[in-house]
Image: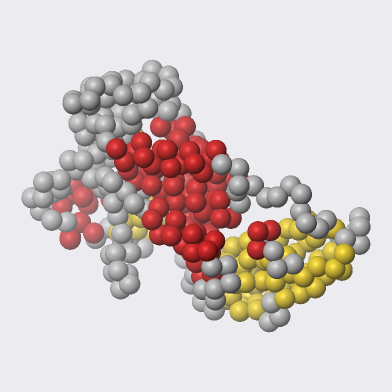
Amino acid sequence: WTSPAKSDIFHQFHRGNDQAPIVALSRLCDAFPGDPDWIRWYAAVALYSEYQKKAAETTRPWGVLPAYVYRDDEWLKAVEGDRYQSSREAYREQVLNGMPMGAGYYLKAFPVWFGRRGNYGVLLSQAKGLATAARLRRDEAALDLVARQLEWVVGRNPFVQSTMWGEGYDFAQQYSVSSGDIVGSLPVGIMTRGNRDLPYWPAQNSYVYKEVWVHPSARWLWLMEDLVSGDHHPDPRPKQPLEFSLSQQTGRDGRVTIRLSARGAGRHTFTLRADNLAVGQATRKLNLKSGKPGSLTWKGRMRSAAAPWVAVVIPDDDLSRRRDVVGAVRPSAGKR
């Protein structure tokens, strides 16, 4: 949202900075692990990650992160005659060409835009946010999705063409008037034709979509840091012989059951931190015998059934070995 009033949905269309709050919250989690608000910061990052993974299913087989959710009445606030905004009717048509979600909301693969077209500013900033979340959560599936975004840029797209000059297959000249061709440079990005919500990459070399800007390359390098670094992987040599996994069940009435399955040896303590979920005894102990599985169960109730909940389980007060689980009340048929 553009403000705490939650009256207008936040959108960008050229130079995106969607990663900023996710990076900030992730760094807060790392810097202040014992803060009472830690679980709130962590939950926000986890929910962003889950949203992006779910939203990317709508653009299969490419798995490109969609731009934003729009409302069908936003065109009424569009500024007529703006240099980069030609008409309210065009704004409305672009929104309605997105994927309908019900209640007047639409999910768009590309932003609503006019003069400045090309989606790498938004796409790569969102990918950075997802990569940051993946590292915090040690989520390999999310990191794989980040890699899909970079593959889209260098040729895994409907045009089978790399958009990075000097890298990949069949790369084309870019609009770089003053500097000439630069190996590794990226343009503003793939755009749409007219008011459609489909990728369009014409052959002609023209601004703005093929114009070389700094921010796409900067985002690319920042993402490389996340994908190349190996510190997001769990420690293959745990301090104690312990492995555990989590599962959950969320009822329509907001009642939640979280189950922990563990293998190992010795006495272990598991502490649960939760957001939007009230549980009784947060810390449980479990005696494990080698070769025999053990289990624990937490039962709780959602504080608000209208929002998802997030829980993090920490073994033996070692936050680096945490695991999380996310749940929500699924809408009944006819209420989607």
Q: Which one is nearer the viewer's eye here, 111 or 149?
A: 149
Residue 327 percent across, percent down from the top left: 59, 64
- Looking at the image, the residue that sits furthest to the bottom is 280
- Looking at the image, the residue that sits furthest to the left is 81
- The answer to whether 273 is drawn above or below residue 12 in the figure is below
Give the quadrant of the N terminus: bottom left
Q: Residue at position x 65%, y 63% from top?
A: 319
Instruction: For residue 92, say whether it is visible.
Output: yes
The answer to whether 200 appears left or right of 225 in the picture is: left
Q: Which one is nearer the viewer's eye here, 50 or 227?
A: 227
Check the image and tell me how it is coloured.
Answer: secondary structure
- Looking at the image, the residue that sits furthest to the front is 31
Residue 35 percent across, percent down from the top left: 54, 73
- The answer to whether 20 is drawn above or below residue 202 in the figure is below
Q: Residue at position x 85%, y 58% from top?
A: 264
Residue 231 percent across, percent down from the top left: 60, 47
The answer to whether 15 appears left or right of 253 in the picture is: left
The answer to whether 235 appears left or right of 171 in the picture is: right
The answer to whether 267 appears left or right of 238 in the picture is: right
Q: Quadrant of residue 218?
A: top left
Q: Which one is nearer the viewer's eye here, 26 or 197?
A: 26
Residue 90 percent across, percent down from the top left: 18, 47
Instruction: For residue 305, say whether it is visible.
Output: no
Numbered disc total: 0
Q: Residue at position x 50%, y 47% from top?
A: 131
- The answer to whether 259 is drawn above or below residue 237 in the figure is below
